[in-house]
Image (cartoon, grey):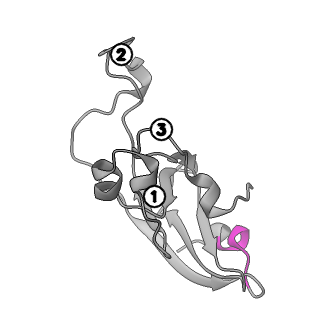
Amino acid sequence: MYRMATDDLYVRYIYPQENGNRADVRWVAFTDLRGVGLFASPVRDGSADASFSFSALRYDAAELEKAQHTYDLVPRKEFVVHLDHAHHGIGSASCGPDVLPQYVLHAGEFSFRTRLTPFTADSLSPVTLDKQVL
């Protein structure tokens, strides 16, 4: 289990862009300073290795796209959270190698269900929530 302040997920690139994605995640939980939070995990269909990707930033994709410099960004009080089934690997062959075959995301139909559960850290841990079968 890893813990990190949500603001530390942001990468201050010179030219703002989407960032901070964490891949191969089994679950993620966000809490405030009182321990009140939200737990998220994929709904597992019998596959023990079900995972997803997430990011949590104080900016949405449009704000990052519009900004020319980091000082153009005005942080929100809240976080914008993205939960994703899959991501295409980094690389486009525009100025270097293309994505390795195992990281290519092929277009196609898929199903991705997510479980969102409110909780308080003093009464229920995210580890316990992850072990619950729906």
Q: Is residue 37 above or below residue 75?
A: below
Q: Earlier in the sequence, mark 3 or mark 2?
A: 3
Residue type at numbered disc 2: Asp
Work out which residue is located at the far right of the displayed protein and give it: 122
Rounded to the nearest whole Å, what is the CA distance between mark 1 and mark 3? 41 Å
Whether the magenta-drawn stretch holds residue 21 is answered as no
- Relative placement, left or right, of 72 versus 57 is left
What residue is drawn where x is 55% and y is 44%? 24
The image quarter containing residue 107 is top left
Looking at this view, is 26 or 7 the one in front? 7
What residue is drawn where x is 45% and y is 64%? 81
Q: Quadrant of the N terminus?
A: bottom right
What residue is drawn where x is 70% and y is 58%? 4
Q: Report which residue position mark 2 lands on.
A: 98
Q: Residues within 10 Å of mark 3 (few under 14, many from 20)?
A: few
Residue 35 position within the rendered picture, expressed as x and y whole percent measured from the top left: 71, 82
Q: Is residue 81 above or below residue 50?
A: below
- Relative placement, left or right, of 56 versus 108 is right
Looking at this view, is 34 or 10 the one in front? 10
Give, as a single range, the part of the protein colored magenta: 124-129
Q: Is residue 120 above or below residue 92?
A: below
Q: Report which residue position mark 3 lands on.
A: 14
Q: Earlier in the sequence, mark 1 or mark 2?
A: 1
Q: Which mark is residue 122?
A: none
SS category of the residue bearing label 1:
loop
SS category of the residue bearing label 2:
loop
